[in-house]
Image (spheres, rainbow, N blue to C red):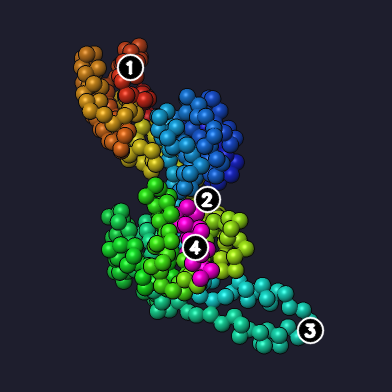
Amino acid sequence: MYQITASTTVAPAGVALFDQDEYQVNYGERPTPQADGLLIRSVDLNQTPLPEKLLTIGRAGVGVNNIPLDQAVEQGVVVFNAPGANANGVKELVLAALAIGARPMLPGAQWVHGLKGNDIDVQVEKGKKAYVGTELLGKQLGVIGLGHVGGLVANSASSTAFGMHVIGYDPYIQVDTAWNLSHHIHHAKNVAEVLRNSDYVTIHVPLTDETAEMLDAKAIAQMKPGSVLLNFARDDVVDEAAIVAALDRGQLRQYITDFATAKLIHHPKVICFPHIGGSTHAAETNSAKMVVQTMKNYLTTGNIRNSVTFPDTAMDFQAPLRLTLIHRNVPNMVGRMTEVLANYDLNIVNMVNRSNGDYAYTMIDLDALEAKRLQRIANKMEQIENVIRVRVIAQPK
């Protein structure tokens, strides 16, 4: 029986997918020494040692900055997230932010709530001229990053309901995502093309070494004067100091973000939300269900999907036994594995190997073996240099 430690903040509908006859679920924010799997949302694990027994971490969301990925990879812990599960929730908040950027709704509502007296209707009619805005119809929206969220935002904004002209840029766009994009969206060749003429710019890229401060002072200087910048991706994909400077000199009219900081929350041209992009009941439930399913699939079959630490790897499980090996991506690893099996006069029923940068994952299916002999083979595999973790999995019944 697999031991799972689950955070109390994870949607119960997801946790309920762990079958009681195969999984024992205990609640906590940190993995216990006995845990095979850890299911979390936002708890920060970066200063938490990962137990030697731990096989997988599931993040019921998208961002994994709260997980020590380098440590996880070195220990052979497969980290899963739930890409796209909260995309609709984030999309809807971005569309609302676009409307807020066009119309001074929030200041107007705050003014109304501060009115006093019995002639509120008269005061409203006299004062409403201070809150005249613009319309989104016909304006240009630049979308940087056309993945799960960015693609939805681009499609919605270019629809007849919004009527915006949309230009998008994503050098790493997936084939399936590209097929789902509206033909009305203009595809830019670079970020500068998006920035130059857009009235509104929204960024939807993951935080990596390449995207950190992607919108810096140089990039912001290329933006259309008086434009509005939206950031519902990650706080560090923009240079906060450069944004404040652009707001102060009028290069940017407004900055709307889901990431509040001390420097931003009191600026008159900034609107900060409390990181609620994916905070809907539907998104939290979808994220929990998705990541639990991928964790279960990995634990019972070894197949990997939606991992941020190892490549997607799947193979039909039709043999009695399966060996899975997490190892460094160095030459002749597969040859050394098959040599061990050849020394035991064993036939490989099926095999797959996938690599991702410095690490790789191999699955080998075998015919039925006597338990002691199987354990000796697993021990031999563990002794191969650069092998990090070996698992033996019996075909699910």
Cα distance in 3D space between marks 4 and 3: 43 Å
Category of crowding for the residue at label 1, using alpha-carbon neighbours closer than 10 angstroms: few (below 14), some (14–19), many (at least 20): few
- State the SS at label 3: loop
Which residues are drawn in magenta? Answer: 230-249
Q: Mark 1 points at which residue?
A: 383
- State the SS at label 4: helix
Cα distance in 3D space between marks 3 and 2: 44 Å
- State the SS at label 2: helix
Which amino acid, by three-letter code, is at mark 2?
Answer: Glu
Q: Name the residue under label 2.
A: 284
The first of marks 1 and 4 along the sequence is 4
Occupied quadrant, residue 75: top left
- State the SS at label 1: loop
Cα distance in 3D space between marks 4 and 2: 31 Å
Q: Name the residue under label 4.
A: 243
Relative image position of residue 372 (x, y in whole percent): 35, 11
Residue 332 versus residue 82: which sits nearer the camera?
Answer: 332
The first of marks 4 and 2 along the sequence is 4
* Residue at x-position 49% and y-position 39%: 67
Which amino acid, by three-letter code, is at mark 3?
Answer: Asn
* Residue at x-position 47% and y-position 57%: 239
Q: Name the residue under label 3.
A: 118
- Specify the principal SS of the magenta part: helix
Residue 80 versus residue 186: which sits nearer the camera?
Answer: 186
